[in-house]
Image: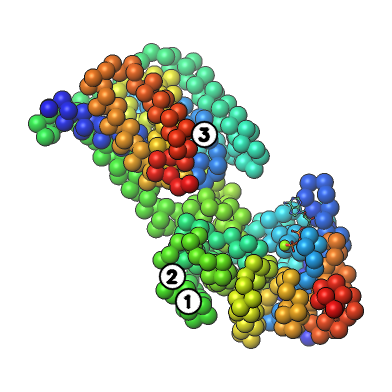
Amino acid sequence: MEAFVSALLNGVLLGLAYGLAAIGLNLIWGVMKVINLSHGAFIALGMFASYFLFHSFGLSPFVSVILVLALGLVVGMVAYFIALHRVISAPELSTLLSTYSLSLIIIGVGTFVFTTNPRAIDVGLGSLHVLGTYIPAAKVLTGVYSLIFTVLLYIFLYKTWTGKAIRAVSMNRVAAEFMGVNTTFILSLSFGIGIALAMVAGALIASVFPFTILSGGVYELKSFVICVLGGLGSPLGALVGGLVLGLLENVLTLKMSVGYVPFIEFLILVVILLVKPSGLLGKE
Amino acid sequence: MSEVVLKVENLETGYGEVQILWDVSIEVKRGQLTTIIGSNGSGKTTLLRAITGVIPVWSGRILFEGEDITRVPAYRRTEMGLVMVPEGRMLFPEMTVLENLEMGAYNKRARSRMKESLEFVLELFPRLKERLHQKAGTMSGGEQQMVALGRGLMASPKLLILDEPSLGLAPKLVIEVFEIIKRLREQGITMLLVEQNVHLSLMLTDWAYVMAEGRIVMEGTGAELERSDEVRKAYLGV
Ligand SMILES: Nc1ncnc2c1ncn2[C@@H]1O[C@H](COP(=O)(O)OP(=O)(O)OP(=O)(O)O)[C@@H](O)[C@H]1O
Ligand SMILES: [Mg+2]
């Protein structure tokens, strides 16, 4: 029973973080119609940014996450102009190749600089006693922070002029331009936000699990599964999808080895694509 | 003589390698309703796309209030007061009616006047009042056209461009759209209208151009064009 409660709590907390990462992928798809194959690489980059800020400046990941967010925003916006701007209206294959090469560059350079030795951030915050079970405080903070970032994004998208412009561009780019929206800026900003969320999720997860520069791939797969679960283009769906995946993962590993998790995730992906391609929560 | 708001000079453009517009020149005067008629595929929408800046111009010039805007990005033109109500309405389907109207007032000039504009639009389209929180994508065609017109008016236009606002509407709603255009004209709003509904638009318009195969082939007052044999044969079916 205690193990089960613990699995549920872990599932929710990690699920929120997975959801946050997926929202980054989802936003980029929704606004730009670009499948961002550099998503995982940026998650890993977020992990290393957090690691570096922790070991060189002694900043806790839960403080430095703001810096990672800002860094991600800038890097993402610059990356948009370098890698995507010229191919944004081209057929999808071009943007796929373009984000894939971005991923190859980040992982290539990252492997050279950081090697593939595992790293960890030991925040040393101890554990919290919740519902009769012990949960690492870092994990609790990771979940709470993820939820806060998700809510802030939601408020930004629905309550501010810029956020509404992002949604408008996602629905009809030309119409948004007719409204006086600088759509080029909005596209780069959306990529910036998507990358920033991926890096933030990486930075938070790095306080919970050890990682290497290659770890992003695992979380990229999770993000894709979550987007398919929740329906591409729906941020709320991504949150729910994240929770579902987090719970599944933690409850299933009570009975089976962790090694099966990617296999199960992939299975979910394939089954949903076969049965309901628009996503479990997606519209037709 | 009233002042010229929009002047298009010897404009040529097209898509890819294919030229669509040939040496097109038109003028729109302040406070007037100017209409472009022409059969399907004659290049009317293409001309409006060039005027609003969503496709590049190959040669020729576009002047708005005396300023050369040929190379100005589309969103800037909206800020300047050149506002488009596009063919097919192009609403933001997942946004509510209110959000769509608010997006109309996105440009800086319009934002500060948003409250008054909204009152004006809701007075013009009282039916939208009960539907402010409905998703625009779930409305009927006629209602969507009202939202599209309202959204254009929210932008505080100095020139309102309407691309086939009556397209696909039932006859009763077509009349309603023209009633609205008439009212806007009485309010002194400068408009450039593209229409297939030749008879109704020629009745209302101050000046009209006829487009065929990417060229302006005729121009005159509505009454003049309605009397002309070519227009009668080609567009009025008499
Ligand atoms: N995006 C595009 N790419 C290539 N050709 C186009 C494109 N849009 C329009 N055309 C072509 O340009 C020509 C003029 O089209 P346009 O839409 O300007 O006509 P229109 O007068 O607005 O017609 P309608 O009354 O049907 O709206 C047509 O031959 C059309 O096939
Ligand atoms: Mg047209």
Q: Quadrant of residue A134?
A: top left
Disc 2 crowd rating (10 Å Cα; few below 14, some 14-19, many 20+) is some
> In the rendered image, which residue does mark 3 sit on?
A36
Residue A67 seen anywhere in this rendered image of the structure: no
Q: Nearer the viewer, residue A21 or A279?
A: A279
Q: Quadrant of residue B211?
A: bottom right
Q: Amino acid at mark 2?
A: Arg
- Residue A244 in the image, given as x and y percentages of width and height: 31, 35
Tell me which residue sits at (26%, 21%) in the image.
A253
Q: Which residue is outermost to the left?
A: A132
Report whether A116 appears left or right of B34: left
- Disc nearest the viewer among 1 and 3: 1
- Residue A248 in the image, given as x and y percentages of width and height: 29, 29
Residue A110 seen anywhere in this rendered image of the structure: yes
Q: Quadrant of residue A120?
A: top left
Q: Secondary structure at mark 2?
A: helix
Q: CA distance from mark 1 to mark 3?
A: 43 Å
- Disc nearest the viewer among 2 and 3: 2
Chain under numbered label 1 = B
In the rendered image, the vertical position of residue B33 relative to residue B164, given as above or below: below
Tell me which residue sits at (13%, 34%) in the image.
A130
> In the rendered image, which residue does mark 2 sit on?
B131
Q: CA distance from mark 2 to mark 1?
A: 7 Å
Q: Quadrant of the C terminus of chain B?
A: bottom right
Q: Could you tell me how many numbered marks the image carries?
A: 3
Say whether marks 2 and 3 touch (CB < 8 Å). Answer: no
Q: CA distance from mark 2 to mark 3?
A: 37 Å
In the rendered image, the vertical position of residue B67 relative to residue A189, given as above or below: below
> In the rendered image, which residue does mark 1 sit on?
B127
Report whether A158 appears left or right of A146: right
Q: Secondary structure at mark 3?
A: loop
